[in-house]
Image (spheres, rainbow, N blue to C red):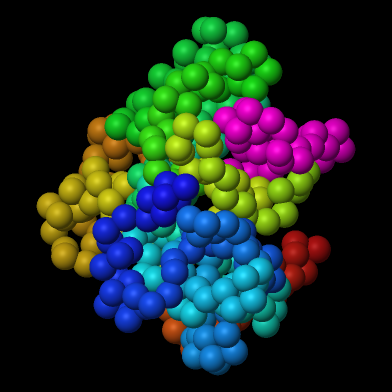
Amino acid sequence: MKIEDLGYNSFFETERDKLGFQGFPVARVISESREAYRVKTANGEYFAKITGKQMFEASDREDYPAVGDWVAVSVPDGEHAVIRGVLPRATMIKRRHGNKNRAGEKDEVQIIAANIDVAFVVESVDRDYNLNRFERYFAIAEDGGVKPAIILNKTDLLSKEELNERLTELENRFPGIDTIPTSTVNNEGLNDLEKYLARNKTYCFLGSSGVGKSSLINKLIGEDVIKTGDISSYSDRGKHVTTGRQMYFLEKGGIVIDNPGMREVGMTDASRGIDVFFDEITELGQGCRYADCTHTREPGCRVMDAVTSGKLNKEKYANYINLKKEVEYYEMSDAGKREKDREFGKFIKKAKKELKSFRGKER
């Protein structure tokens, strides 16, 4: 196997030279679990760990290796590798990870995968289907320089007419985004998916639990390598069977990454990705009366005019505003967030007091 078969190219070679890692072999991170990694070189696979110095110098989670990263390594005992450094990323997909409803818990940035060419957003046609969720994934993909595409899975659950309606809906809402309808039950669309995967390119599968990401990758591999589970009959949610990110190398040369199901996809500093994906709104906004128009209440707003006239989809506009507000909140300083939370707390307290007073008067 050549190093190029793992996705290595001139970009990474140039960055390797800049960092002075010419004396170390390069490897790709193919799995990650609690800061223990498995890496693959042209000659084999190794368990690997980073050095204490890297841990000390890391300022946040983005400084640690992630699945898809290229790293410089040494293999002192011939069996275990030591990661000496992470090469700069060509692309990256990340999300905000944390419970914003839990007091005192800090949101963290989680690297989903690095050096990805295409992000497949997988949704099933049944309980999971949601146009706004597609846009959320598209925004974080575009922000990291990754091309998004759609896999509409479990199409065997729909009639031909119903499937055509869904595909038309996706085309109208997301013109220019590639869509591949698939089913692992009757193998519909699997040949189209295989043809889509180019040699030495890396594809990341994203979506909620139970949409069939692992089953699709098993079909591409040609055997049941990844454990899969059924939908819970109690909650109608997919079971979290895939617990870690894992890279697989297909016989025809494509590289795919399976990811655990994500019920929440929090936005980070993805303003660029939102502006790129919602380019229709971005272009309209350039004609607004005010340069800092928020497109929510200002007079002379071209975006709001387009919504009112029906030229701009109302649901798409509403999702755009929600994502923008989420990014704005993330980008605020910690002090700003605390102040905003305090103001909201005061508002709730005042509202409860006024409601209590109003009910007392009613009596």
The percent coordinates of residue 176 (x first, y second) are 30, 32
Q: Work out which residue is located at the far front of the displayed protein and give it.
A: 78
Residue at 48% x, 26% y: name it: 194
* 267 is higher (above) or lower (below) than 195: below
Q: Work out which residue is located at the far right of the displayed protein and give it.
A: 234
Per the rendered image, the range of residues in magenta is 207-235
* 11 is higher (above) or lower (below) than 221: below
Total of numbered circles in the picture? 0
Q: Relative to the observer, which residue lies in front, 329 or 50?
A: 50
Q: Picture quarter containing residue 333?
A: bottom left
308 drawn magenta: no
Residue 262 relative to residue 53: left or right: right
The percent coordinates of residue 313 (x first, y second) are 35, 35
- Asked if residue 206 can be seen in this view, the reply is no
210 drawn magenta: yes
Residue at 35% x, 45% y: name it: 147
Residue 230 relative to residue 41: left or right: right
The percent coordinates of residue 89 (x first, y second) are 38, 65
Residue at 45% x, 37% y: name it: 253
Residue at 49% x, 80% y: name it: 84
Q: Relative to the observer, which residue lies in front, 275 or 70?
A: 70
- Asked if residue 19 can be seen in this view, the reply is yes
The percent coordinates of residue 136 (x first, y second) are 47, 49
Q: Picture quarter containing residue 127?
A: top right
* 158 is higher (above) or lower (below) than 86: above
- Label the magenta part by its dominant secondary structure: loop
Quadrant containing the C terminus in the rendered view: bottom right
